[in-house]
Image: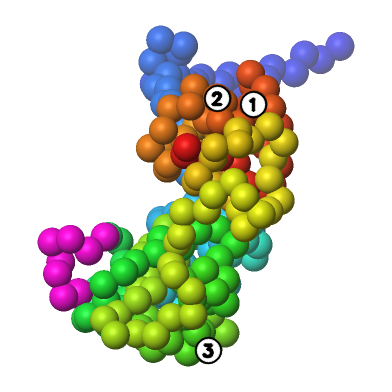
């Protein structure tokens, strides 16, 4: 019987790393999480979508076009990060809000295009639109748009948490802006059960609010909020959306 001799092989010691020589790396934990599915792979700039955001306002804020925003994100949802920049993309500088008559006392940040003689402002909240803001301050939608010149015809580009103008000197209004309601037949409705009889100031519960945020905005303590709204439970998980609570007596 013949014997076949297999050719000998050698392996260079340097080509096979031993456990002691293998270099390991630890991937960075992503900071922009959660991200929406369908974001382009080469994205290098992110933004977390908030309730009330619109494609055109996000695009305008970051100096890009709506077409660019849509091309980089196949889906957009609240509380998820989306892509607002890719390497080499062309951007424009977002507009700086026009200065007001008294920059030292006017609130910030402001929407672009506010008239210079504005004397009263309103901070845009989730769910607001031109009609509701105008009605609250006893002005017409036409007046509102004339004082906030960058608001578009559809009023779809209000920026959440930015200030808009709601009054200028000599403007005619139909009602007194932001009155302090009292607990009588003219007080706002509907109200949460258990509001104290001597309540003089109310707050309309909006989506996403809780006892802490309401108290903080009104400048009161949680204890005061519960004292004036006696049906609020210890966990404060029984706020009713669209109902008024008491924030002052």
Q: Nearer the viewer, mark 2 or mark 3?
A: 2
Instruction: Verify CB contact (< 8 Å) between mark 1 and mark 2.
Output: yes
Q: Is residue 44 left or right of residue 50?
A: left
Q: Using the image, determine if residue 245 lies above or below residue 232.
A: below
Q: Residues within 10 Å of mark 1 (few under 14, many from 20)?
A: some
Secondary structure, mark 1, is: loop
Q: Position of residue 209 (x, y in %)?
A: 57, 42
Residue named by callout 1? 230
Q: Using the image, determine if residue 96 lies above or below residue 77.
A: below
Q: Using the image, determine if residue 24 lies above or below residue 95.
A: above
Gap in angstroms between the C-alphas marked 1 and 2: 6 Å
Q: Is residue 113 left or right of residue 240?
A: left
The majority secondary structure of the magenta stretch comes to: loop
* In the foreground, 8 or 133: 133
Q: Residues within 10 Å of mark 2 (few under 14, many from 20)?
A: some
Gap in angstroms between the C-alphas marked 3 and 1: 44 Å
Specify whether residue 222 is painted magenta. no
Residue 95, image quadrant: bottom left
Task: Identify the mark at residue 158; answer none if there is no mark.
Answer: none
Q: Position of residue 190 (x, y in %)?
A: 71, 51
Residue named by callout 3? 153
The range drawn in magenta is: 99-107
* In the foreground, 106 or 152: 106
Task: Identify the mark at residue 227; answer none if there is no mark.
Answer: 2
Secondary structure, mark 2, is: helix
Q: Position of residue 147 (x, y in %)?
A: 35, 83
Q: Position of residue 61 (x, y in %)?
A: 38, 69
């Amino acid at each position: 019987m013949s014997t076949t001799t297999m050719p000998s092989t050698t392996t260079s010691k340097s080509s096979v790393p031993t456990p002691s020589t293998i270099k390991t790396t630890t991937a960075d934990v992503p900071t922009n999480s959660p991200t929406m599915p369908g974001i382009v792979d080469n994205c290098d700039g992110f933004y977390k979508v908030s309730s009330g955001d619109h494609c055109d306002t996000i695009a305008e804020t970051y100096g890009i076009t709506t077409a660019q925003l849509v091309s980089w994100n196949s889906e957009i949802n609240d509380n998820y990060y989306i892509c607002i920049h890719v390497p080499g993309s062309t951007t424009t500088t977002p507009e700086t809000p026009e200065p007001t008559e008294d920059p030292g006392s006017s609130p910030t940040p402001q929407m672009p295009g506010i008239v210079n003689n504005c004397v009263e402002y309103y901070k845009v909240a989730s769910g607001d639109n031109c009609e509701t803001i105008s009605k609250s301050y006893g002005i017409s939608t036409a007046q509102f748009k004339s004082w906030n010149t960058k608001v578009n015809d559809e009023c779809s580009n209000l920026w959440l948490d930015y200030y808009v103008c709601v009054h200028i000197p000599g403007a005619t209004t139909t009602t007194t802006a932001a009155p302090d309601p009292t607990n009588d037949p003219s007080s706002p409705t509907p109200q949460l059960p258990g509001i104290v009889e001597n309540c003089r100031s109310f707050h309309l519960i909006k989506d996403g609010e809780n006892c802490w945020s309401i108290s903080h905005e009104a400048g009161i303590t949680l204890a005061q909020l519960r004292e004036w709204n006696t049906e609020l439970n210890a966990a404060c998980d029984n706020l009713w959306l669209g109902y008024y609570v008491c924030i002052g007596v």
